[in-house]
Amino acid sequence: MSATLDAMTTSPPAPMRILRPQLTFLTPAFLGNADQNGQWRTPPIKAQLRQWWRVAYAARKGFRVSVADKRHEEGLLFGNAWLDNEFCKSLVRIRLDRWGEGQLKKSQWPKDSAVTHPEVRNPVGSALYLGYGPLIYERASGGTALKANAAIQAGEAATLCIAVPNEHASILERALWLMDRYGTLGGRSRN
């Protein structure tokens, strides 16, 4: 029995720093779950954190970056399945204080004004034009409506809990700062 326990024993985890940023949406957000309903979820948040980590990493290196070195460090921090003999789980752990469905329902989508565009024959709702995909044209009302049952409403907020090894905390804090200033999240956020 002790041989089995010894084989299962691992070195203690590195000391972790816990970051608790507040995430608030300024506009409706489309973070779709499996049913394409808006729901608070961690995967898109972690993907954005990873994206801004790359920018912070490049800045830290004076923008003289070896892509191979960056991919190696990124893979060890965020997890990977591609590094030879070094595949691993992510060292960054993210939790939300809630995973609730968005509160903005189909019936609550605001009426938008029609705009003309040279590539579209008839005037189209401005929100529909920008939100193509999560938003649809609803024939019954003659206006724009949510495609699925819910979106995260502007003003909704949640607290993230991010656990990260101490030696990576400063660069992730910088990535969070960049997310706060420049980040967009959810479907159609780059339109």
Image (cartoon, rainbow, N blue to C red):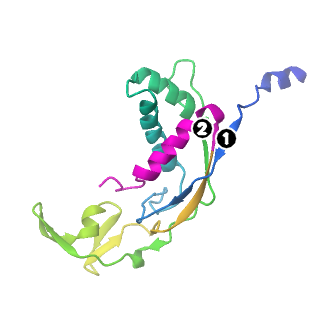
Give the image quarter of residue 119: bottom left
Kindly give the residue lying farthest to the right in the view shown: 1
Left or right of 93? Residue 53 is left
Please say if 74 is above or below 84: below
Left or right of 138? Residue 69 is right
Residue numbers of the magenta segment:
163-191
Q: Residue at x 43, y 64 (%)?
A: 26
Report x, y in % for residue 89.
60, 33
Mark 2 residue element: helix
Query: Looking at the image, which is closer to me, 177 or 100?
Result: 177
Kindly give the residue lying farthest to the bottom in the view shown: 141
Q: Are marks 2 and 1 in contact (CB under 8 Å)?
A: yes
Q: Is residue 174 magenta?
A: yes
Report x, y in % for residue 30.
42, 60
Q: Residue at x 57, y 64 (%)?
A: 100
Please say if 133 is above or below 104: above
Report x, y in % for residue 155.
48, 68
> For the residue carrying disc 1, how many other residues have a C-alpha within 10 Å: few (<14), some (14-19), or many (20+)?
some
Q: Is residue 78 magenta?
A: no
Marks 2 and 1, the one that precedes in the sequence: 1
Instruction: Specify the label residue 17 is tagged with.
Output: 1
Q: Which residue is mark 2?
A: 169
Mark 1 residue element: strand
Q: What's the residue type where badge 1 is placed?
A: Arg
Q: What's the residue type where badge 2 is placed?
A: Ala
Query: Looking at the image, which is closer to me, 164 or 110?
Result: 164
Q: Residue at x 45, y 48 (%)?
A: 179
Query: Looking at the image, which is closer to me, 55 or 130?
Result: 55
Report, in whole angstroms, how far the alpha carbon at label 2 lies from the one at label 1: 7 Å
